[in-house]
């Protein structure tokens, strides 16, 4: 399946100022697959090292001299390692701190060797470990689950993707039949999500029960990971906070509240658990912004945030939402559908590299996302249906007079009264 990060890997390979690359991201987002596929397509040969599975590999890194490491790896793997023509892959590198440190010396002394390091818990291990990290000596890329554009491409809908992009750019409605098809795919995606194994499973089998089994397996693997690089006393807290993310998205007020995690719960009790989940890439915080001014990050409220899971499909699976509930717009799903839709938009924006915030004006108004598009600070309102009546944008526009606003909903493309109407399926177009 086509992944957009492939082009970024190619840009890294062709960059003369290239440094060793660290590809980070949550478990099961497709890091190992895409790097091995990239290596097979773009290099004469490659060697793959997995520090979790190949015990003893760490012995090669007691001496951090790059040439000695290369010599040992070449003999162990029985492959010639050629500068520029061999890709060296270090998977689960967080399991070997010395290998992480070695990247500094490869950058300084042997940068002719192309190295990609992968780690699903790298952020946690580095933050909580006691070893030297090669600051400034490596390049980072973050990989996310498949966004909706990649999902459509996996379904063979290249023409539809092109039409959506054209209509987004021109603010002209998409033909009704294609609009309805895109909405059907969007509802499908809310259930399936973007984890590559789950997407592949659904495309091949069209079996929603198998999709749910695959999603539950991933959720269980995330739960198992919570015992790694974590204090014993923090493991149950981390698990309960993770489960509580989707629970709180079902509430009308979607601000994350510790009292719903545990009666009398406080931030100090769960800060470490939240940090673990964010560093592992399985969840992210969306902070409230107190003032619309630059730099946006300087005006965020550290005590007020919403919490989203890294994949909308896993979000629904964590609450065992049925496929038909989404497809048929079950009215009993109303509150959670709003949270699920926000989670979806958050995932799409995060994949596109946005720094995201939300804004409130007391109890009068709330803007779901504040983003910076080119030079403009743009309010983005999210509606889970085609009912777009809301006074929040009016309150915001009256106070800050933005150049334009964006409303994501089930409605077709258009532009009226300073509001750019974007169907939810086209969220990936906002960059």
Image (cartoon, rainbow, N blue to C red):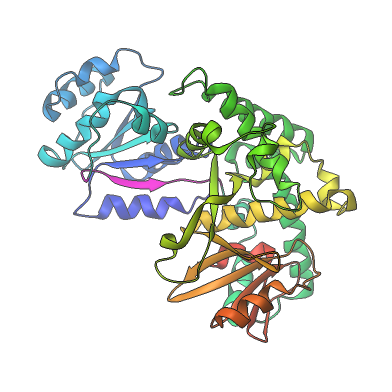
> Mostly what secondary structure, the magenta segment?
loop
Residue 294 shows up from this direction: yes
Horizontal and vertical percent for residue 266?
A: 59, 36
In this rendering, position of residue 422 left or right of residue 102: right
Q: In this rendered view, identify the residue nearer to me: 72 or 187.
A: 187
Residue 75 shows up from this direction: no
Horizontal and vertical percent for residue 420?
A: 63, 78
Q: Within the magenta stretch, is there residue 35?
A: no
The quadrant holding residue 201 is: top right
Q: What's the residue at 71%, 51% (across, down)?
A: 339
Q: What's the residue at 20%, 30% (across, down)?
A: 102
Question: Disc count in the image?
Answer: 0
Q: What's the residue at 67%, 36% (across, down)?
A: 244
The quadrant holding residue 382 is: bottom right
> 271 above or below 18?
above
Which range of residues does the magenta coloring cover?
136-145
Horizontal and vertical percent for residue 37?
A: 43, 40
């Amino acid at each position: 399946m086509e992944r957009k990060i492939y082009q970024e890997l190619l840009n890294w390979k062709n960059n003369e100022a290239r440094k060793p690359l660290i590809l980070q991201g949550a478990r099961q987002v497709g890091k190992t697959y895409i790097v091995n596929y990239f290596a097979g397509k773009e290099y004469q040969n490659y060697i793959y090292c997995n520090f979790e599975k190949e015990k003893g590999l760490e012995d090669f890194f007691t001496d951090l001299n790059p040439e000695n490491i290369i010599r040992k790896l070449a003999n162990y793997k029985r492959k010639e390692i050629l500068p520029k023509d061999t890709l060296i892959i270090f998977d689960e590198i967080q399991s070997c701190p010395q290998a992480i440190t070695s990247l500094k010396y490869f950058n300084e002394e042997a940068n002719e060797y192309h190295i990609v390091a992968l780690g699903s818990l790298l952020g946690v291990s580095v933050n909580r470990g006691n070893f030297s990290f090669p600051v400034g000596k490596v390049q980072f890329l973050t990989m996310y689950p498949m966004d909706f554009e990649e999902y459509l491409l996996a379904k063979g809908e290249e023409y539809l993707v092109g039409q959506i992009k054209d209509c987004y750019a021109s603010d002209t409605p998409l033909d009704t039949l294609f609009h309805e098809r895109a909405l059907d795919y969007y509802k499908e995606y809310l259930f399936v999500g973007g984890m590559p194994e789950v997407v592949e499973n659904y495309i091949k089998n069209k079996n929603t029960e198998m999709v749910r089994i695959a999603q539950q397996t991933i959720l269980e693997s995330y739960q198992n990971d919570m015992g790694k690089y974590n204090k014993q006393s923090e493991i149950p807290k981390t698990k309960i906070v993770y489960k509580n993310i989707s629970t709180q998205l079902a509430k009308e007020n979607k601000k994350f509240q510790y009292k719903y995690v545990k009666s009398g719960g406080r931030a100090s009790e769960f800060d470490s658990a939240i940090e673990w989940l964010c560093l592992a890439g399985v969840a992210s915080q969306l902070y409230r912004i107190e003032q619309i001014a630059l730099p946006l990050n300087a005006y965020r409220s550290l005590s007020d945030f919403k919490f989203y899971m890294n994949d909308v499909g896993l979000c629904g699976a964590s609450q065992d939402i049925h496929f038909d509930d989404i497809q048929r717009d079950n009215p009993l799903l109303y509150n959670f559908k709003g949270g699920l839709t926000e989670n979806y938009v958050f995932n799409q924006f995060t994949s596109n590299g946005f720094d995201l915030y939300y804004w409130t004006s007391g109890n009068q108004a709330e803007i779901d996302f504040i983003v910076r598009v080119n030079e403009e600070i743009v309010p983005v309102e999210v509606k889970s249906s085609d009912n777009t009546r809301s006074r929040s944008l009016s309150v915001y526009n009256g106070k800050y007079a933005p150049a334009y606003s964006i409303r994501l909903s089930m409605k077709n493309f258009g532009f009226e009264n300073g509001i750019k109407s974007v169907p939810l399926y086209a969220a990936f177009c906002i960059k």
